[in-house]
Amino acid sequence: MKSLLQTLIARSLGDTSKLLTALGLFFLAWGTIAPISTLSWWLRDGNRLAQQRPELPEQDVTTGTGPSCYLVFLAGVGNVADVDLSPGEDIFLTQMAAAVPNCVVVREVFPYSAVSDDVGGQPFFRWVWWLSERTGGEDAPARLVLKIRNLWRMALSADNRYGRAYNRGSAATILERMAATEAVPLESEQPFQIVLAGTSGGVQVALGAAPYLQQWLPVEITVLSFGGVFDGQTGFDAVEQVYHFYGQDDWIDNLGTVLFPSRWELTLGSAFNQAQRAGRYEAIAIGPHAHDGDRGYFGQGSVEGESAEDTTYLDLTLEQVKSLPIWPSP
């Protein structure tokens, strides 16, 4: 009996090991071919951005005075479409629009495609998206596949080989969404402000797009990171300030400091460390937040220990963001 039990355990472990190895090889192969769609787009349409900014329709451009501020939101890797915002994220943007009426809120940017094409518009992933919608839940296997797909796109943004193409496309999409929301003053004599707010991998894409937005527009760029995961080179030389909010129970936020050597303290010359020494990067402990869910940065769960019983994690986030010294006066 003991021998039979040992045999079954050994076989089970062997099968599990084979399965994990197969999955690992599959995702490695997937990562290897991830740049293909970006490179094909670049060869077909994107290389025009190497020399000039995107052309915008006349109604999306103003030669006079335009908005002094745009707040652009880039969602985390759990989002699969440009309109796939969580209820808390939607409330956050609505309340920021009310609190800072001089800042135009731009919502519909999908960071995990060079042309902001959500996964439902991509034939290979359309059926996975359909399956994730049918099965439901953030932990559904199909939803996990889509998150891994988005992680590979985030990695493209940080890659010094493919990032230039990917990030130009992301910057062009941000500009087009800004213009579609309210006409952009392309030739303004006074620089206007762009606040790129992102969660998780959306922060990497925001930093990747920043140099091209700065090149194309008369702007000053600020990045708001909510538990963001990002490298320590891309975009730091193009932004005025990065505010990185982190939660006490958010372990994912720490991945960037582990995965990217440019975030390590020993790499003194990295753009991240230079920005930190110059005071252009500030890490702010926002509260007992987790990375996502009811206790996330936009979570609507009640915070234990707060004097007001109905204080939510989103409330703490809004309080911190509204107090930043970056918003234009009414």
Image (cartoon, rainbow, N blue to C red):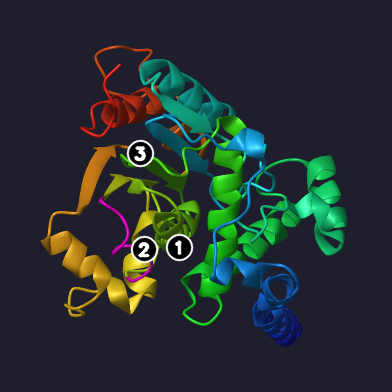
Q: Residue at x 62, y 60 (%)?
A: 150
Q: CA distance from mark 3 to mark 2?
A: 18 Å
Q: Residue at x 45, y 63 (%)?
A: 208
Amino acid type, residue under disc 1 in the picture: Gly
Relative to 307, 171 lies left or right: right
Q: Which residues are magenta?
A: 233-240
Q: Quadrant of the C terminus?
A: top left
Is 235 magenta? The answer is yes
Read off the residue under disc 1. Answer: 208
Give x and y (percent) for residue 319: 29, 24
**Which residue occupies 58% across, 38% down?**
179
The quadrant of the picture occupied by the N terminus is bottom right
Amino acid at pointer 2: Gly
User: Which of the marked residues, 3 or 2, is nearer the chain's N terminus?
Assistant: 3
User: Dot 2, how many residues are within 10 Å of its Cα: few (below 14), some (14-19), or many (20+)?
Assistant: many
Dividing the picture into quadrants, the one containing residue 232 is bottom left
Instruction: Look at the picture and state if 196 lies above or below 257.
Output: above
- Dot 1, crowdedness within 10 Å: few (<14), some or many (≥20)? many
